[in-house]
Amino acid sequence: MLTGAAMLLLGASSRASVSVAPLPGLSVETMGVKTELPANLWKGMEEKRFRSLMTDLTRRPLTPALRRVVTEALATDGGRTSAPMSAFLDARLEALLVLGEAETVLDMIDQIPENELTKTRRLRRLDALSQLGQYDQILEIVSENPEDGTDVYRINALVALGRMTEAELFFDVLMENKEADSALVTLGNRIFRSGSESIPAAETDVWATGALRVAAKTGFPPKDKRTRGVWRLLVSLENAPLTERLSGAEQLGDMAFIARADLKKENPQLPMIKRAKEWQAFVQSKKLESKAQHLKKWAVSAQKDGVFVSAAEAVAKAASALPAEKDTVAAAETLVTAAALTDNMTLAGLWFPLLSEDKQMQMSVWMHQLGMVSPVINAEKIQACVQKTTPACAVFMRQVPTYFPVGTSAVFDLKPLAEGAYPAVVSAALEEQRLEGKTGALLLEGVRLLAASSNRETDVLKQLAYVIPGSWARAIQMERLIIDGYRTD
């Protein structure tokens, strides 16, 4: 009986269709670091579309929350997904450099097996170290492992460190041996030999020649064309003009650099210099009321010139220098805004009660997003806003239909929130990518759409929110709410 049953089972097993195949091997092209994003991120990504998106996204001034999505996507380990395109890892490293994410580049390169560490990838390490201003380390690497292409890094590092005599000696040797490329020849002639050649545009070699270009007093892209990576490079260059470095620090939210900058020789009428002085006065002042006033003046100017959002994390950290009390009430709006941008409900709860009733109404939507309930929002307040619009009410009423259940027909007379937003077909296309498992494509396309739009774009963000952590989606949403909240039209 048992034997027959066993034979029956064996017979069934022998007739079953079993497919055995080896797992696809790990590819260095999809390697990276572990992130909170889904596995097989780059499934179905087309090379032409990827490169087009990277060209757009890396040259666009992304907000911190949007940049985080792109950075994490580019850094994500794709596991056993087969390489979807050629030189994919190299393209991701280059894009991360342009985004100013030098530490991520170094982390990824450190994980590349030695047999896969090509010359290009070794040069990307030098690029990342250049962006961080680690010129002593660059000299150490180049001295221990000299190879074709590293001479320009050596000369650039020596110039950055102020060792001009050594830099000139190495340049002369390269010229005698006819080993310098055309860009280095032009830059070296301008710096060491009073040459007058036109400086070539800084593109692929900007990391390797940053200090040289500063010494030549030209060769960087115009300010409105500089990527975050270029700004970061400039901040790290001690031979760059201070105004250039301060501009970069504001783009990066590097308030520590601004706090220690020597402003004595700078034009006090420049907005960035005025802001830097206000920040330094905030840091240095001993009186609480004075600190709060300086922080408020800095924030008003920073919001006007669009550099507040990048500094939000530093502002939130600086809040520890101020107790929430009567003498510091001037800082309340600044710190509530920073709290909202950094998802800091504790900080928001501390300072929100110090706001005026008008400001509490204006910021109540942000507090709602943080999970706080504002006591000033009621039917009477809403009705008053409808009947007599103030700047605070204008902001509130633009946002209220989306974030609060409003039992009044008056809101239907408001200007449509989604006017000019992307049509439904765009959201449908993103949803199709999501359903097909094309997560990487969805992330990059979604960020591109959000970065190019001034509308709320809730449908686009909804599709992104399916595949990114909730805290990331909330940060993007909060940024857009707050940027919208600066408007009073």
Image: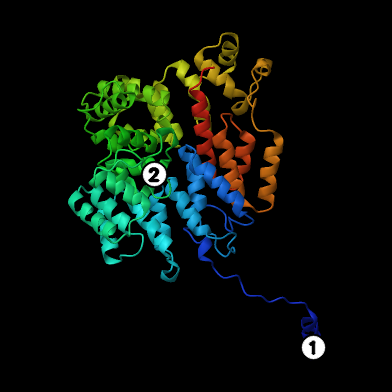
Amino acid type for the residue under numbered disc 1: Met
Of pointers 2 and 1, the one earlier in the residue sequence: 1
Q: Give the label, 2 or 1, closer to the camera.
A: 2
Q: Position of residue 302 (x, y in %)?
A: 38, 26
Query: What residue is shown at x 43% (from left), y 28% (from top)?
Result: 306
Query: What residue is shown at x 62% (from left), y 75% (from top)?
Result: 22
Few, some or many residues within 10 Å of mark 1 (<14, 14–19, 20+): few
Amino acid type for the residue under numbered disc 2: Pro
Few, some or many residues within 10 Å of mark 2 (<14, 14–19, 20+): some
Front-lying residue, 76 or 90: 90
Determine the image quadrant of residue 272: top left
Question: Mark 2 = which residue?
Answer: 200
Q: What element carries label 1?
A: helix
Do tag 2 and tag 1 residues touch (Cβ < 8 Å)? no
Query: Which numbered marker is on residue 7?
Result: 1
Location of residue 463 with respect to 488 vertically, above or below: below
Quadrant (top left, top right, bottom left, bottom right) of the N terminus:
bottom right
Front-lying residue, 276 or 395: 276
Q: What element carries label 2?
A: loop
Query: What residue is shown at x 41% (from left), y 20% (from top)?
Result: 355
Quadrant (top left, top right, bottom left, bottom right) of the C terminus:
top right
